[in-house]
Structures are given as C-alpha cells and as structure tokens.
Amino acid sequence: MSAPSLYTCLLLAAASSSCAALDTERNLAPLYSEHWTAGGGVGIESLGGTVLTHRPSVEAKLDSWAIRPLFIHEWQDDLSRTEFLHPLGTVTRGEGEFTWNFLPIARYSRKDAPEVKTRNNFMDRYTLLVLPLGLYFSQFPDGRRVRAAFPFLGATDGFLTFDHIEFALFPLYMRTERDGRTTWHWLFPFFSYTDSDDGEAWRFWPLVGHNQRDGSRFAEPGAEDEPLPRYDRWFFLWPIFQYQKNEQRLGPDEEETSWTVFPLIGRTEQGTFESTTLLWPFLGYSRDPATGFYSLDFPWPLINIQEPGTSARARRYRFWPFYSIYEGDGMVARSWAWPLVQHRVEQYRDGERETFSLLPLYQSFTRTYEGEEQPTQWQKLWPLWQHEEGPDHVKSALPALNPLWHTPAFDRHYGWLWELYSKDARDGRSHERSWLGLWRREVDPYEVRTSLAGIWSRRTYRSDGALTHENSLLFGLFRWRTTEGEGADLLPPALPGPGWPLRPSTEPLEPTTTLEAP
C-alpha cells in the first residue's frame, strides 16, 4: 500500500471510528488506564497511580489492590498481607494465623489450634496489646487466659522476657517469675525480694542490694558435691559502690571479680585478665598477658586501641571521627570522617555482604550467596537514582528522593509520587513506567507493548511466525498493523484506545529478532 493510499484510509477510519471493546486496553492516563502487564496479567491504574488493581489473567480474580500511599493489599490462595500507613500498620492472614499491627499503638495476633478442643469449641490462641492504654489480653490453647490493664491490675504469661508477671497499682506491687526465680517488688524499683532454689536476692534501692545464685540448676543428677555459686553481687548507694563475683563455677582461679567506685575508678580481674577504668567511661585499660590481648581508651569514645592477640576478641582501632577499623564476629568495618564514609564486609553462613556509604550522597551493598554466580547489588545516588540487580531481577528508579537505606517497601508506597522513571524486571518480564503512568513499557518473551498516554502506542508480537507491529495514535482513532513480509494494513478505530487485546500472545519472540518496525 502506497503512502497516499495509507493516509486516505486513515482519514476514512477517523470518520467512522468505533469504541474499544471491554476486553481491550484503554489508556486515559493519568486519569484511568486498563492495560496488559508482562506475563499475561491485567492492571488498572487511576489518578496517576493512586488507585491500582491487578489480576494475573483476564479470567482471574484480583490478586492485589492499592490506594497509595494509604493501603496496599496482596493475596495468593489463602495467604494475604495488607500494609497501611506504612511503616506503621500491617495485617497478615494465612495458614491459621492472623496478625494486626499498628506501631507503636497496638498489636493483635490469633493462631488457630484445632488440635485442642474445649467443651464448647476449638480453642484458638490470641494476644492483644494496646500500649497507650496499657491493655494486654491473651488466650492459650490449653484454656488459660491472661488479662492486664496496666498500671491498675493484671497477670501475664510469656510477656517480654518473663515467664509470669502479676501486678496491682504498679509500681506499688509486682510479682515476676523468670528462669526459675520469683521476685516480689514494692514501690518498684525501690524494694524487692527474690527467692529460688538456687539463691536469693534483695534490694533497698539505691541504698543497698544483694543478688546471689549458685549452680544447682546445672549440677549433675545424684552429685554429692555441693554446687559452686554462679555469682555474688552487691551494691551500696547505687551506682557509686558495686562489688561482684561472677563465673564462680570456674573456681577461684578463673572466676571474675569486679568492683567500682563510680565514676572515679573501676577494676575487673579474671584469671590473667585485668581491666581498670578511670572517670568512667573516658579512660580505661585492659590486658591479658596469657593471650596478648590489650585495649586502651584514651579517652573514650575518641581513641580506642584494641589488639586481640590469640584471644577470640575483636581487633579495633578508633581515632574518632577521623578513622576507625573493627575486625571481629565475622565482620570488618571501617569508617573515615564518621559517619560520612563507611565500608563494611560481613560473613554469613550462606555468603557475604559488602556495604559502602558516602553520606548522604551514595549508598551501596553487594550480597553474595553460596551457589549463585551473580551477586545481588544495590546502589543509590541520592537524590538522583537508585538501582538493584540480582540473578533474576533488576529494579531502577529516578529520581530517588527517599534518603533512607535500602527500603523497597517504603519506595513501593511513596516512590511513585516523585519517580519520573521506574523499572522492575524479573523472570524474563519487565515493567517500566513514567511519572503518573503517562508512559509505560511492558516486555515478556511473547510481547512488547509501549504507550504514551493517548498520543501513541505500539504492540510487537508474532503471528503465524511473522513479526508483527501494531500502532495506535490519538486514543485509538488511527490504528494500523505492519506484518513482516506482508506490509501495512489499517485497523478499525478503538476509542479510547489503543484497543490491544488484554489476552497475551502465545508465540514467543525470538531473542535475536529486532523489535523495531521495518
């Protein structure tokens, strides 16, 4: 078909335009768009990305919806997760569990326990914590119930690090149980008494206090020897005078002895190890001639020099804020002009993580997993750009106004407000989008679709082995198809276009095939 004939046909099509079918793409961005997504899904976007819905296919039900930045809800089968007012609120449901969080206000969780049957029904486990009101309610599968209205009256099990807590008109009275020890408190923290089979403790704070515990819990059954004490601790006029003996099970030669006249001087000795502190925490010196370990604070936190020798302690040199290095616990951390320049390498059981930051402009990390040839890398040049790339995914965005460290959930809720361009590609599928969704590009092994609001759109796919390009102009008013080896054909108008079918193609695009129209 010649060019003049093509133009004539386009004019005739404009005069006899028709509406797009309900199962086709419609693009009125930023107000509304319904579009095919790479992989065969269908997405709807309204108000520049404020309202989103997605379903994995034309026939399928929704698997996510969002009213950003207020809500994002996703579900698959019986599992679902809702994030609201991120990072404050989350709701998760699935596999017999339900959890609702609104930090730092309240938390509710419930876990079904059908294996435990009560007289009336199956008993579930649930907990409710409302911090501002001091409310805590819990129910256990065995029928136990816990109620607390802090500070008035309550009893709880398994809360924080305690096995059991009872209180009435706190701080007037409280009783706690932990690790086999029972403690009674009156006018907390001033008066307390602790009793157990392996020692007792009492306190008239801040005047005097004593805490002692033996090793009977660790003694061998049937042992005739009296168990050695674990620790013996005193304080007078806390925190001024303190005296402790720890690790007494190791015997007199290996137990730890420490005393303090706060803040003037403190001393600790254990075997060949000794440590002295003056004007705590500013001046301190520690050493162990048996291992070659020594540490010097002169003064803390400005200068710290620590050499481990043959001990398992860390190596540290700090001349704050100019330079510091820490080597230990599977980590090497360096900083220059702290906190401006920092570099860290951490070893894990399944790989290694390396991070670098030049605050506030540049941040990056590289995470290497065993068995994977390509590491996962993330970089941010704030406030211009950020990029993440791994073995099976690529994510990019610009600008990147979020000043926080790697926080993809935060970006998902708020990044669309300022990102002029974003890309999310994984498993051979790529989703690209401009600000307000005015420009969009979807790519998978079967199709490539690109659109610019209602101005222009193109679809590239294969039909009976022939590479085919379909184009749309002016909200679907002018549409034509170009097929490899056959030339161009007019398509009927499809207002408000582009009118491409929401169902995906089934013929793969060959990797070596150019995606540009001939």
Image (cartoon, helix red, strand yellow):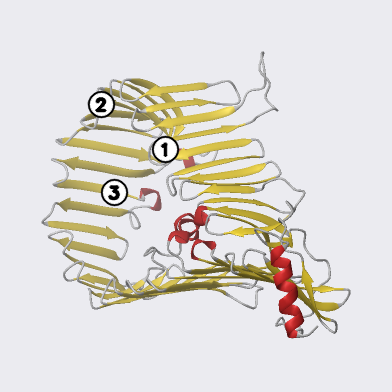
Task: Quote the CA–CA distance across marks 1 and 3.
Answer: 27 Å
Q: Position of residue 126 (x, y in %)?
A: 54, 29
Q: Residues within 10 Å of mark 3 (few under 14, many from 20)?
A: many
For image coordinates 47% across by 70% down, the residue present is 330
Task: Quote the CA–CA distance across marks 2 and 3.
Answer: 30 Å
Decide if residue 39 is in sight here: no
Residue at the disc numbered 3: 245
User: What kind of element bears circle 1?
Assistant: loop
User: What kind of element bears circle 2?
Assistant: loop
Q: Which mark is residue 201?
A: none
Q: Which mark is residue 171?
A: 2
Where, by quadrant of the figure, is residue 325 drawn? bottom left
Question: Mark 1 or mark 3, which has the lower sequence index?
Answer: 1
Q: Residues within 10 Å of mark 1 (few under 14, many from 20)?
A: few
Looking at the rendered structure, the number of numbered marks drawn on it comes to 3
Question: Mark 2 or mark 3, which has the lower sequence index?
Answer: 2
Along the line of sight, the residue nearer the viewer: 66 or 320? 66
Q: Position of residue 139 (x, y in %)?
A: 53, 25
The residue mark sitting in front, 2 or 3, is 2
Q: Position of residue 132 (x, y in %)?
A: 33, 32
Q: Residues within 10 Å of mark 2 (few under 14, many from 20)?
A: some
Residue at the disc numbered 1: 160
Q: Residue 160, relative to residue 406: is it above or below?
A: above
Where, by quadrant of the figure, is residue 130 drawn? top left
Along the line of sight, the residue nearer the viewer: 231 or 2? 2
From the viewer's perspective, is 497 left or right of 167? right
In the picture, the quarter occupied by the C terminus is bottom right
In the picture, the quarter occupied by the N terminus is bottom right
For image coordinates 29% across by 38% down, the residue present is 211
User: What kind of element bears circle 3?
Assistant: strand
Q: Name the amino acid type tagged 1.
A: Leu
Q: Name the amino acid type tagged 2.
A: Pro
